[in-house]
Amino acid sequence: MFDNTTFQALVEAGNLTGEVVAINRFIVEVKGLEGVRIGAQVLFDDGQRGMVREAYGDRVILYNIDSELLMLGALAVVEHDMLEVPVGPELVGRVITPMGLPLDNLGPITTAQHSGIFNLAPGIMDRKMLDEQLASGVTAVDSFFPIVLGQRIAILGDSKSGKSTFLSQLTANQQGTDRIVVYVLVGKRKVDIERLLRDLRESGAMEHTIVVLANIFDSLTQSYLAPYAACAMAEYLWYGGQDVIIIYDDLSGHAEAYRQLSLLQEVDPGRDSYPGDIFYTHSSLLERAGKLLTNGKTLTSLPVVLTPNDDITAYLSTNIMSITDGQIIFDLGYFRKGIRPAVNAGLSVSRVGGQAQTKRQKQLSTALFKALARYHQADEFSHFSSQLSKETKVDLTRGKHLYAALQQPPEQLFSLLEQQLMLETIMLPEDDRSIDIAKLKEAVKGKVLPGEESYTPTEEELLEQFGAHVVSEQPAPAVEEPPVTPDKKPAKAPKKEKR
């Protein structure tokens, strides 16, 4: 049973108090608390907590954070001016609720600090330009749509299109760095949660990850608060001098939770029944990412949005894409064809990715896009003609090699150097020779080169080792004209008669 000594101490300290007069599931109306701040944390006499959402004179509307129902007549007292959560390095490696309570049976968590969850984003004068690439380990992303530390880049796709697999790969690839990953799960099925936690533990990624878990069936309010609470935990580490990556999986579930709370609160619905401030709700959250001027550290934000039937033109999808600095779109059609990861290169973009690339990397990215475009054009042409030119054969072979190189199982990760060596080796030959891509992938693993000047000799060596030389076909003999002899002169054209 709750020990109400904390409640009693707050009352004796003169904090604002009130009484519960109406309850509608997670929406609680309290009489009293005049002058309370919006977003304040309230403690009830049974130990449950709430957050002030609206105030009307002597009536205050609160969100009940816990899952238990309150009783009419329950007393409430203001605990903090803003809803707070525990923060600190003690949370790393743990699975917790948005309020910081452990869910992994590894014992209690004791932190020395707490932070408000609705913090303001850094101002423009407090930011630096983004200039360092975040390696995900996935070739199709790092080489085509590079993610930059401090960037906000959306991950869009239908269910079961490979979004979570990619995010698990990105998280696992941060091993060996000082980066912390904060992974927020909102409204996920139990089987999906267990699969993700298993993948993180098996890859060793859990050692540098905080998993914030909000189950929509337990508390609708916690599903709404989870992204803000996780962002506060990430910000504390960020301002403390660490690079942090935060993954919101997913903001579609968060928007649904907020929509349900707003409808219970009888807020006038807007488009798709979302409340009118849904854009501000997400923009104020995602704008908290960036790179600090004071310590040069970054907070990278990756919001995930579900796109049923691969429809990226829906209200929520377009909202998030307009807020972020790019998007990586996973196509369910590609996934069903066996293309893994199923990244749609035509619709994906990283608007600041070029800021973190070297000149050589930019040239490679441009060449790759052109090569794939020529491949699709040549592939389309090959269906209508059996006789192909040498250039068409080269385009077809190179495109097939590139797609084979981009195929990547979840357990396979490549560094930026390994990706560059592999792709530049494929782009080297000017003929349609065959390259053993599987052996090439094995050969580039673990390569360490002193500088870009040593790349080309290494790539030529790899091509010589794994590229099969093409034996050129013998040209057909030319048809010779019959020789002109004195006995047999060529006939002259008849003269036209004069009229």
Image (cartoon, grey):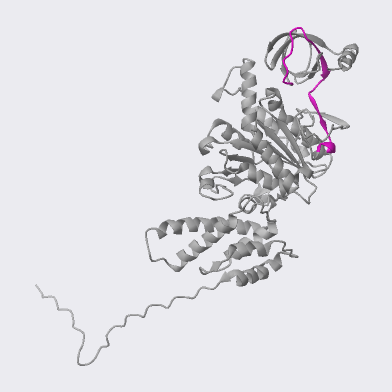
Q: Position of residue 144 (x, y in %)?
A: 61, 52
Q: How many marks?
A: 0
Q: Residue at x 73, y 65 (%)?
A: 449
**Front position in the image: 146 or 159:** 159
Instruction: Pick the quarter of the image with the C terminus.
Output: bottom left
Q: Position of residue 53 (x, y in %)?
A: 71, 18
Q: Residue furthest left?
A: 499
Asked if residue 243 is among those painted magenta in the image, a careful observer would answer no
Image: 75 above or below 379: above
Whether residue 129 can be seen here: no
Quarter of the image where one finds residue 74: top right
Depth check, front residue: 256 or 497:
256
For residue 183, which quarter of the picture? top right
Task: Indicate left or right for 269 with 449 as reference.
Answer: left
x and y percent of residue 151 in the render?
69, 43
What is the magenta range?
Answer: 66-91
> Relative to 224, is 367 above or below?
below
Q: In this picture, is 173 found above or below 427?
A: above
The image quarter in which residue 467 lies? bottom right
Q: Is residue 377 left or right of residue 224?
A: left
Q: State whether residue 49 is above or below residue 165.
A: above
Q: Residue 452, how many percent across, how many down? A: 70, 64
Picture residue at 42% right of the left edge, 78% below the top: 474
Residue at 59% x, 46% y: name it.
Answer: 349
Query: Quick check: is 77 in the magenta stretch?
Result: yes
